Every structure is written in structure tokens, then in C-alpha cells.
Amino acid sequence: MARMRRHRHHLKALRDTALAHTREPHPDLAVLARELGRVVHRDGQALVDDMVRLHGSSRDFRRLLLSRRGQLTPVSVLLVVWPPDHVTPSHDHGGLWGLEMSLHGALEMESWTRSSEHSDWQLRGRDWLGPGDAMWFDAGTSTMHRCRNMSRHEVALSLHVYGGDLIDCNAYAPEAQGSHWHAMPQHLRIDGALPV
Ligand SMILES: [Fe+2]
């Protein structure tokens, strides 16, 4: 019982921090990253220990809801479980703003930008996120990225905050020649909700 309460306490701190800094339609995502990073550096190991107890045996990629978008909370907050070496397709975020932060392990993020919906994608670069590190993007269709758990042996965990429910988005695959990419509509699955 005490374990469950502690588990909820750490998840609640992350969720409450995410919601407290996203009340505006265009929240300051740098401030959100700083405040979430503070929680991860303070509570990170305890949070991870509890998550590993709950999901340590799982080797599946899982998206778990911490907070669903509602009338009072226009954002969604998710925890993502990454199997070793798991890589996503290159994907956009359905036009939503978003922030993605490593909680445990290291994620590689390869990012592309484009000047309009009809322009080709240009590689922007690679970032490596350790616990408490985040990347974020504004609303619109000008960015996409591909994310990978850099460990070949260990599960990684990350926190995702979006300006709505991220259900429908696009994955992209490059054509064999040239710099054009095909868009492929995706319908993302939620694998469960965490008790907070
Ligand atoms: Fe993403």
C-alpha cells in the first residue's frame, strides 16, 4: 500500500507540474522543460524504481496515460516505455505542440524541419537526451523526428506532454531517390492509464 502511494506521489508530481505550466494556449515550453527537469532530478530514481516494479518485465513499447485532455486541462500527459534499441518511424505530432523528456535511460532524437506542408524535409540534427533532458516543438506541421532507445539491453522511460490528444499523426518514409518523403497516416494506441 505504501509502495502504491509513493508510486502515485511521484507520478502525481510529474503530472501536476506538467499541468501547472500548460494552462496558456501557447505555454512556454522552455519553462515547462526546466520545471519537469527539476522534478526528474529530485524524484527520478524513486520514480523509476516504482515504474520498474510495475513494468520491468514488459518488453513492449507502451504509451500510458497520466492525464487525458479535458475541458479544464487542454493537454495530454503520457509515459512511454521503450524496449531496448526500439526506434520509432519518423513522425509528426498531428499539428500539436509537444515536449518529450527522458526519465530513465538515453534517447536519440533525429529531427527534420520544413518551411511549409508542401516543402521537403531538411535534416536539422541529432540530440541525445539523458534523464531530465527534453526537446520540444511548437504547434504546426513544420517538424518531425525519429526517436530511439540508445540502450541495447535496458528499457528506457520518457514523459510526453502534448497540446491535445495525440492519436492521429503521420509517419514518413523517404523515397529511394531525392529528398521527398511519403506521408503515412498513423492511428496511435494508448496501452493503459497509470493511477495518479
Ligand atoms: Fe514524438
Image (cartoon, rainbow, N blue to C red):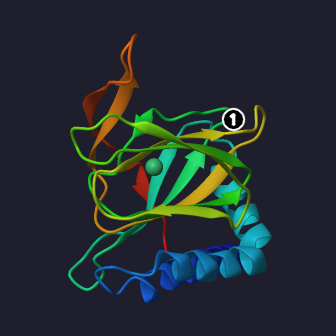
**Whether residue 89 is situated above or below residue 136 in the rendered picture:** above
Give the residue at x 28% y 44%. 169
Q: Amino acid at mark 1?
A: Pro
Asked if residue 1 is positioned above or below residue 149 in the image, the reply reads: below
Residue 121's x, y, as percent?
A: 38, 36
In the picture provided, is 109 more to the left or to the right than 15?
right
Instruction: Tell me what residue is drawn at x 40 percent, y 82 percent.
Output: 22
**Residue under circle 1?**
84
Task: Determine if residue 10 is in view.
Answer: yes
Location of residue 72 (image quadrant): bottom left
The residue at the far top in this view is 176
Residue 159 percent across, percent down from the top left: 55, 62
Where on the picture, by quarter, is residue 73? bottom left
Residue 43 placement, left or right of 86: right
Q: Nearer the viewer, residue 83 or 137?
A: 137
| Left or right of 3 in this view: 120 | left
